[in-house]
Image: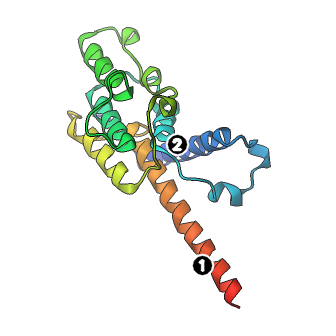
Amino acid sequence: MIPYSSNKFICVTILIKIFLTIVYLKVHGKDRKQVSSESVSGRANITIGEALEATVVTAGSRPVDYSDAAAIQAAEVRATGRTNIIPGGVAAAAQSAATRNARLTKEEEKTKLAEILAEASSKLPSDKPVTRKDAEGVIGAELRNDPNLCTRPGGVAASIAAAARLNQTNSTSSTKNDDNILKQKLN
């Protein structure tokens, strides 16, 4: 196992946050130059599908393995609210790719995360904003299915966790803004 320094983890987390912000802006049709820091912090919450798409940027060139498939399955189940995976869905494709990749020896023949997670938002029949509970479930699934019992920086679990942190920060800052507005009205 290759040890990762905290600096690499911080860089990957920042990259995920930047990408998720860009995804949000693209989805909501805003030009990056027109957006102030205030409007970015007041944006809608990041969905599970968008967080899965962020993984394409950070770890898309890595072959799909069983821990990735388990994390994707956990994310899909939480996004859809179903207890089983959807035939032909993102999780089913990831599981199939992980099984195929385990049998292949040539790295270039293996299915990559980018192939599975590209446009994940549109492949999910329903989606929801990422919560801390969602992140914990996805992290747990990735940990349980990794032979070294670790998550990968920039992987599926890291993207979901970064989105959950951003959503939590957004809800905290919007609550503070609501409190300030209420105080102003009372004065």
Q: What mark, if any, has residue 179 been given in the picture?
A: 1
Of the two numbered discs 1 and 2 in the rendering, the one whose residue sits closer to the viewer: 1
- The answer to whether residue 177 is left or right of residue 135 is right
Q: Residues within 10 Å of mark 2 (few under 14, many from 20)?
A: many
- The answer to whether residue 160 is left or right of residue 150 is right
The residue lying at 66 percent from left, 54 percent from top is: 40
The residue lying at 46 percent from left, 28 percent from top is: 123
Q: Residues within 10 Å of mark 1 (few under 14, many from 20)?
A: few
Q: Position of residue 139 (x, y in %)?
A: 31, 45
Residue kind at label 2, given as amino acid type: Ile
The residue lying at 29 percent from left, 23 percent from top is: 95
Of 37 and 24, nearer the camera is 24
Residue pointed to by mark 2: 16
Residue 44's place in the image compared with 4, above or below, is below
Please indicate, yes or no, whether residue 3 appears anywhere in the rendered image. Answer: no
Quadrant location of the N terminus? top left
Please indicate, yes or no, whether residue 38 appears anywhere in the rendered image. Answer: yes
Q: Position of residue 138 (x, y in %)?
A: 32, 43
- The answer to whether residue 185 is left or right of residue 173 is right
Query: Which residue is at the far bottom?
Result: 187
Mark closer to the chain start, 1 or 2: 2
Q: Secondary structure at mark 2?
A: helix
Residue kind at label 1, given as amino acid type: Asp
Q: Secondary structure at mark 1?
A: helix
Quadrant location of the C terminus? bottom right
Q: What mark, if any, has residue 5 been given in the picture?
A: none
The residue lying at 55 percent from left, 42 percent from top is: 15
Residue 128's place in the image compared with 76, above or below, is below
